[in-house]
Amino acid sequence: MKTIQSFLLIFILLNISLTAQWSSNPAINLTVCDTTGEQALAKIVSTSDGGCYISWFDTRSGSYSVYLQRLDAMGNKQWAPNGLLVSNNPQDTWITDYDLLADDNDNAIIAFSDIRNGGNLNPVVYAISPTGDFLWGNNGIVLNPTTDFQPSPKLAKNQ
């Protein structure tokens, strides 16, 4: 009986590892986004369940947009194959740094600057749930809609 149980356990474990997306070979990359245009300034942050969020600026539509992908602990994509569109609000022809973190509920918090307010570079912040819901509205929250130049917002998490 123990032999059958051991065999079943080994069979189950082998099947679990066969479905994983993470390669055991560090020379083989996991493709997060495979589409036209440039994918720039990628950031990654881990989640409490062993997964992660990966964000980037993307020019597949002809100008910079912000995308996000969630991977589970096995490296499987949880959203659309080439990521979830977070924002396609107007960007300049160049981009600045931005920030990404996971909050205590494993929501992705992403802050960046864009020019949606009359060409002024202002910071905006979005909260995206693990299921891809926009928790702070489809357009996020504009933090300071002034004429001041406000690049590269940073996020902080209370401990």
Image (cartoon, helix red, strand yellow):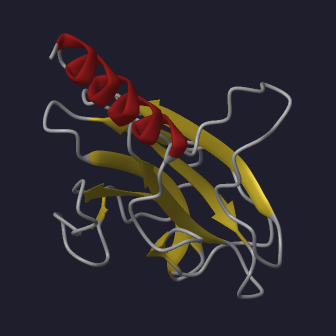
The vertical placement of 48 against 17, above or below, is above
Q: Residue furthest front?
A: 1
Q: Residue at x 15, y 30 (%)?
A: 104
Q: Quadrant of residue 100?
A: top left
* Residue 85 x, y percent position in the rendering: 48, 75
* Residue 40 x, y percent position in the rendering: 75, 54
Whether residue 122 is visible here, answered yes or no, is no
Q: Nearer the viewer, residue 102 or 159?
A: 102
Q: Residue at x 47, y 51 (%)?
A: 76
* Residue 22 x, y percent position in the rendering: 60, 37
Point out the image quarter for the C terminus.
top left
Q: Residue at x 75, y 61 (%)?
A: 39
The vertical placement of 64 against 108, above or below, is below
Q: Residue furthest bottom?
A: 61
* Residue 140 x, y percent position in the rendering: 29, 67
Q: Nearer the viewer, residue 92 or 40?
A: 40
Whether residue 29 is visible here, answered yes or no, is yes
Q: Quadrant of residue 134?
A: bottom left
Q: Residue at x 21, y 56 (%)?
A: 129
For residue 39, side relative to residue 159 (left or right):
right
Q: Nearer the viewer, residue 4 or 98?
A: 4
The vertical placement of 111 against 6, above or below, is below
Point out the image quarter for the N terminus.
top left
For residue 109, side relative to residue 57 (left or right):
left
